[in-house]
Amino acid sequence: MLDAEIISVSPEMDKVKKLILKIAKSNSTVLIRGESGTGKELIARAIHKNSLRSNEVFQAVNCAAINENLLESELFGHEKGSFTGAVSDKKGLFEIADGGTLFLDEIGELDIALQAKILRALQEKQIRRVGGVRELNVDVRVVTATNRDLLHMVGEKRFREDLYYRLNVLSIELPALRERRTDIPVLIDYFVAKHTKGTNHKITFAPDARKLLDEYAYPGNVRQLESALERSILLCEDDRVTLDDLPPEMTQSGGGTTASAAASGDLFALPIDGVNFEDVERSLIMQAMERTDNNITKSAKLLGLTFRTLQYRLEKFGFKKDEGTEEGEDS
Ligand SMILES: Nc1ncnc2c1ncn2[C@@H]1O[C@H](COP(=O)(O)OP(=O)(O)OP(=O)(O)O)[C@@H](O)[C@H]1O
Ligand SMILES: [Mg+2]
């Protein structure tokens, strides 16, 4: 059994959990990929917790949050006097995590020079402090995470290919929350319990609020769901969460794709409070006409309409016939 507080019931996450169990005991590098807020750090901790290193250090560092110059000394440490401000020797995170697991978050943000140094640390299992001459042996399992397409970055020469393959020995693809919708209700229960713990609040949901929570597409994934719940639990009256208590980005029109649109691959998301269909139609037609310099034939093609249909609609919207140009259907 996996020892971790990963709340899920979806088959997609079952697969992830099985994979964690399989790979946790090895010392290989793991690359966790997933959108922001999908739980990458949670997975990294689960790997550590279920590994043979579970009694040792788990050290996390966000490569995007630390300035490039400081990051090197943060990771590898420095010797006294190696740069202004290096007033004493300092251990780096590789040394601190010796025997344990080092989680390098947002690995795609590492600059090229540091990428080379990390590669060396992984290959030689040795590091050198900034300003130091000694090679220090380190036994660290490295787990990394990114929401970037590293292979694409390799193609653009922004990420070292050799490091990519080194990091990608084992990889875990974390599905977005909208791709595992069955997890939403259990996560809602879990976060409601978490954020009412120690109080005697019994939270209920107005049906439309609950429907939105269940059906929203969550571009910010689990983190967004948790913060929406935390907020609404604080704001709601009489322990009843209504639409008004949910964050504006979830309730405002056009502010969020609903899940049904995202899940079914619909081109356009119907805003929660609906739309004026004629306005949408007019807007699309005017955009097409603008793009084609008022050419009706080309606009009709862009819109997937016949020439006649578009002409009819243009007239309906008060567009005068002589404002548009026509040309042969084949051109
Ligand atoms: N399956 C889950 N069960 C319980 N909590 C979860 C789950 N997935 C994510 N969380 C919680 O959601 C929050 C976001 O997760 P985490 O920080 O691991 O995401 P992330 O992928 O690292 O995000 P980012 O890319 O923004 O750094 C955390 O508070 C985490 O505990
Ligand atoms: Mg993270």
Image (tube, helix red, strand yellow):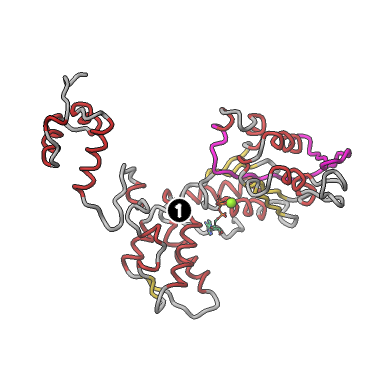
- Tell me: residue 100, above or below residue 243: above
Locate the C terminus by quadrant: top left
Report the side of 137 relative to 277 (left or right). right
Rendered location of residue 212, percent (x, y): 35, 60
Q: Position of residue 33 (x, y in %)?
A: 55, 43
Q: Is residue 153 left or right of residue 110?
A: left
Residue 183: percent from left, percent from top: 44, 57
Query: Where in the image, quadrant-wise, is ligand 1 located?
Result: bottom right
Q: Which residues are magenta?
A: 123-152
Q: Nearer the viewer, residue 123 or 224?
A: 224
Magenta span includes 141: yes
- Disc 1: residue Cβ within 8 A of ligand 1's nearest atom: no
Q: Is residue 102 magenta?
A: no
Relative to residue 172, is residue 209 drawn left or right?
left
Q: Label 1: which residue?
A: 10
Which structural element holds mark 1? loop
Three-letter amino acid code at the position of disc 1 = Ser
Name the spot of residue 113 as percent of width and height, x first: 71, 34
Give above or below for 310 relative to 328. Answer: below
